[in-house]
Image (cartoon, coloured by chain):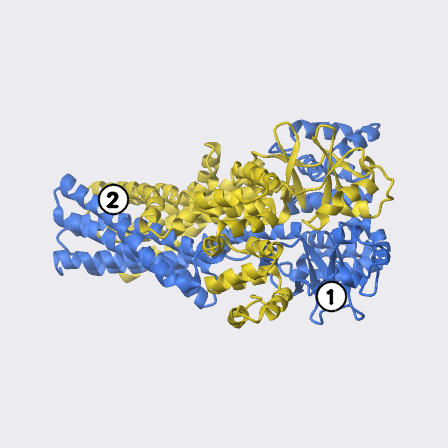
Chain colours: A blue, B yellow
Amino acid sequence: MGETAEAVDADDVDELSLLTQPGREDDLQTFLLLLHPADVAELLAEAKGSTALTILSRVSPERAAELVSELEPADQERILGMVRPEQLGPILEQMDTDDAVDLLQELDEGTASQVLAQMPAEERREVSQLLAFDPASAGGLMQTELVKVPMAATVGSAIELARPDAAEFQIFSLFVVDDVGRYAGQVALQDLLFARPETPIERLMKPKPVEVQTDVDQEEVARLFDRYSLVELGVVDREGLLVGRITADDVHEVLVEEHGEDLLKMAGTWGEPEELYASSPWTVVGRRLPWLGATLIGGLAASLILMKGVLGMPEAGVLLAFVPLVISLASNVGAQSATIMIRGLALGRIDPAEIGAHLLKDLRVGAIMGTIVGALVALLLTVWRGRPTLGLAVGGALALAMATASLLGAVEPLLLRKLGADPALASGPLITSINDIGGVLIYTLLALALYGVP
Amino acid sequence: MGETAEAVDADDVDELSLLTQPGREDDLQTFLLLLHPADVAELLAEAKGSTALTILSRVSPERAAELVSELEPADQERILGMVRPEQLGPILEQMDTDDAVDLLQELDEGTASQVLAQMPAEERREVSQLLAFDPASAGGLMQTELVKVPMAATVGSAIELARPDAAEFQIFSLFVVDDVGRYAGQVALQDLLFARPETPIERLMKPKPVEVQTDVDQEEVARLFDRYSLVELGVVDREGLLVGRITADDVHEVLVEEHGEDLLKMAGTWGEPEELYASSPWTVVGRRLPWLGATLIGGLAASLILMKGVLGMPEAGVLLAFVPLVISLASNVGAQSATIMIRGLALGRIDPAEIGAHLLKDLRVGAIMGTIVGALVALLLTVWRGRPTLGLAVGGALALAMATASLLGAVEPLLLRKLGADPALASGPLITSINDIGGVLIYTLLALALYGVP
């Protein structure tokens, strides 16, 4: 099953729809049991809303909770928008608290509070507390389902403590707490399995485990999982009391999300990614237009430089016609250097102690590429148009502008980082316009040097 | 410890260096025991090579293996390049097979085969087999350490089978195989813990588990972990025989790596990312220059259009001076639309059935932004320069070019996907140059319409 790109297809959707007809309840149950909940969820997402609703009402709340947890946020919103709050309550009660919180955040506020009201007091309290955390923080990622055992427990008593939970959620380790509930240590399930029942938990536990406070950003959480190769991570409050855990699959989602946000930010958009997919064009304009302001100002400045500097020269028209070439090449070279620097810093491929050497290399790379491209263009203009001075101006400007852009592109992420901003912004519109101005300035100055002031 | 950004600092490096002096062996052991192997590895990476070597020789091969596994590839290469092959053999023997394979791939071929020769026959055979797989495939990611139990086992006998492995590697579940070794099912450790010893394994196991073949690409492996919220994934050969497992932390690394490769590809580079960090500028030029060829051709085409179309018009010089503005804005708008489409498709935020609606919205967004920016520039040129025709030409071109670029930017990833190429290329130099030509063409045609053919 693993090697196929998609585990379900259109035929399955049709079959599922037929199985929701009256009298075929048993066949439906058999069909559903053969599939992984993630695959059933995909079928629900592709089926008609009424089919999805029928299926959710035919299965147990436990099974419905599994299916709903696997749905994409947009599908959760669409399908569950049609379910009555009093039906949703029991389903949410069976979901892991982190998934329940994610779901409640998809619903409109009125429905969410109606659904909350349907949940038992204990669950409602836990979910309400989780809802208060920033969704992009450790508190927003964590679930409250975990096995907490006192330090005085033995292996045998700890197993008995965990037994009721084993049917409810996945367990990878037990979380050991001290007398007041502070996180004291972790015991992997495999160490428990092979120990004698009378062994004190304290002897098995790994003390000083990696932990994270509720307000820590999700990017830092992901970094901790990576650094310490974690399967799960205990979350504590400001007093060090253990309040939840984050599991590796949640972090997986964080990485995919952060990746997308990086890309969108680099392309010059701002705000929440969802708003870029809003149905109103005006919302989207609001997220895209502001960054173009930088480009507008940069472009106007470049035009002004060209008008003051180049206009009036003997070959002004031809010179100006080659500006797009210089700008595009400088801009691409700058983006290459910036991205290489950003990734190099993020992955540790560039040693901070050797940044000087890397910058020098980037300048050399830009100079080599600029010389090759510049010589090619100079030759072309000399042979094709019979204009050696024009060739020298354009070719020389390309060489200088590409070398400068290569260095600037590498320096900009470093400057942004120094200013406390995200280095990834360096390939966005803000910096592109600085590179544009730089390229046009070099071009104009070289033309002035070659042709003389008009 | 979790809430600090860096768990170790320069003082720790100094202290570590002092502790390697003769007579302080016990203090060194105590110091090392207090830290997580990942933190010690960071200290080793920051310390002098001789300090790192001393420490690796003072700790047990098991501990050395842990530390080496945690080092970044570049540090592994640097530090272990100084260790003699006969010392490395015992360390590699203690490493998980997937980490050992990664390490051997960092070493030069001569050293690697010397080190392999130092390993016991069984380990050497396993590692050699893994080395044959593509590092970016399931086979290249997997480790051979896993607990395999026959279907006829009971809970009690399965636990006894797993016991010797528990001290060697992390166990999350047992892998059940049939008589010929085909992967038949999975038993989570927690189900084992709470079952009676005489329970047949077959009753506890989850049949038809998600599996992957050795030759499947790592991106697909990451997708499976995400889709099925996996902690580990069994790997089978073409005959369905269980040959290894991949754990969630390996996939974490894959995601970070793929993210970086995406970004570098989008910035117009090709080949292996490491080569972009090579010490020779010529290697780097080889990875960056080819993509600039597309920009060069696009830029030359744009210049040609301007020379044929605009040169000779009454206000040619001023018109040409505003080309950078049009090109930069069109290029940014195109990059925005392309990135929004690429991410929307990847994350399922854009429903494939509603692509037409999304494209129409992108065109509207581009038209709105173009009209706003174009009107602003037209007004500016009319008031500031007193040239309404110029204002109309530049402003009008901006409006049309931005609307077109917004649509083109969204269409291009779709076209690339249809052609079997990576949609992410759509924000790279290849497509940027198409957008440049489009912008210049619109500008020229509008100028011709307003000023008449020269």
Position of the C terminus of chain B by quadrant: top left
In the image, what residue type sits under mark 2? Ser
- Please state if B239 lies on the left or on the right of A265 as rendered: right
Q: Chain of mark 1?
A: A
* Number of marks in the rendered image: 2
Residue under mark 2: which chain is it in?
Answer: B
Residue A144 versus residue B210 in the image, above or below: below
| Badge 1: residue crowd in 10 Å (few <14, some 14–19, many ≥20) | many
> Which percent across, then down, holds residue B37?
60, 60
In the picture, measured across the screen, residue B70 lies left or right of residue A244, that is: left
How far is disc 2 from disc 1 in space, using C-alphas? 67 Å
- On the same chain, marks 2 and 1? The answer is no
Please tell me whether mark 2 sits on a helix, a strand or a loop.
helix
- Of circles 2 and 1, the one toward us is 1
The x, y position of residue B384, in whole percent, is 28, 62
**At 27% from the left edge and 50% from the top edge, which residue is drawn?**
A368
- Occupied quadrant, residue A188: bottom right
The residue wearing badge 2 is: B303
Q: Give coordinates of residue B175: x percent, y percent.
A: 72, 39
Quarter of the image for the N terminus of chain B: give it: bottom right
**Residue A316 location in percent, x, y?**
17, 52
* Label 1 sits on residue: A183
For mark 2, does the 10 Å Cα neighbourhood hold few (<14), some (14 to 19), or many (20 or more) residues? Answer: many
Amino acid type at image mark 1: Tyr
- Where on the picture, by quarter, is residue A234? bottom right
Q: Residue at x 73, y 63 (%)?
A: A185
Q: Secondary structure at mark 1?
A: strand
Residue B119 visible in image: yes
Q: Nearer the viewer, residue A102 or A241?
A: A241
Visible in this render: residue A434? no
